[in-house]
Image: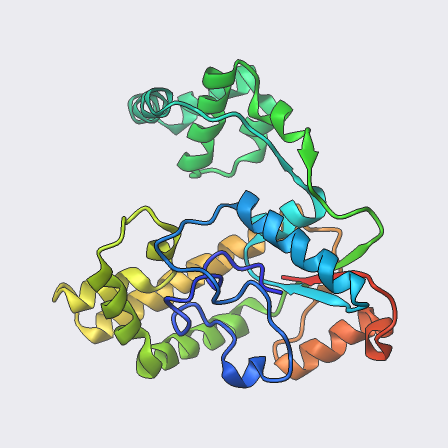
Amino acid sequence: MGADALQIYRDLPVLTAAPGPTERKGVPHHLVGTVDGSIGWSVGRWLTAANIRIAKLREAGVDVIVVGGTGLYLEALVKGIAEIPPVSSQVRAQATEEFGQMGEAAFRARLAGVDPAAAERILPGDRQRLVRAWEVFVGSGRPLSDWRTRRQGGLAPGSWRGVRLMPPREALYSRCDARYVEMIQGGAIDEALALAARQLEPSLPVCKAVGLRPVLSHLAGLMSLKEAIAAGQQETRNYVKRQEVWLRGRMASWPAVTDIDPDDQWRSFLALNPDLTASQGHGTSLRS
């Protein structure tokens, strides 16, 4: 089952490296390529759908492997999510304006006065989450960290096992660079062109796919193809770094598979979960 915030959409299968027909033949894939890009899915909506699928598969005696690069989805699945009250557009706009006026250091210091856990947890440069933490406090009167302790919808403890994919960074960079070229040669430009023709709201998740912006810039005549490829490769490497930070910080207790070759990764995964080779048990294993 997919735990990727972009592979769930059917619009960019090449650019999001979604499992192709060969990979999906004989192995059921769930929550991959099932949603139109005009519909913006949230982590809450994905969690509801994932829990329904997992429950049905478990009833059928099927082991579930949840795979994806969206750490927030995996964290929500195993821990649940908090029902945070909505924040008005006025409060959100004011928080954004204040961040711009104060700068990150002063804004973070003010946040630390009301929500020290959030101020410490949010990484440097993460303007979006800093603003979010402040706007929730202003809008609800309670710190975001307090709301986050009231999680629901997660898997039962002991019913799942997690595994991190942590191959050597330089080897992974090389693979990512080569894959982006393959994407460009394999239909990514046509995908971007078709998506642009729909004129969707730019804030939709599908419009924020890693590597999409350079292709659109190339199509608009703002970049050569060579420049677009270089920019797309750099975006991908930056994303790799962010994923590693998440995995090392938020999923440090999960055992790591450090192989780079997919076949070796699978063998290491099965070594960590030997019961899956015999199709025994109804547990849920997760891989990121």
Compared to residue 101, the image places residue 52 above or below, namely: below
Would residue 270 be visible to someone looking at this image? yes
At which x and y percent is residue 42?
A: 49, 45
Whether residue 165 is situated above or below residue 130 in the rendered picture? below
Answer with the quarter of the image where residue 52 lies.
bottom right
Residue 3: quadrant of the picture = bottom right
Q: Position of residue 142 (x, y in %)?
A: 57, 16
Q: Is residue 36 left or right of residue 140?
A: left
Q: How is the image coloured?
A: rainbow
Residue name at image x 82 percent, y 54 percent: 159
Q: Is residue 80 above or below residue 36?
A: above
| Whole-percent x, y for residue 230 in the image | 30, 70
Which is nearer the eye, 31 or 99? 31
* Residue at the left extreme, as displayed: 221
Q: Nearer the viewer, residue 151 or 40?
A: 40
Q: Quadrant of the N terminus?
A: bottom right
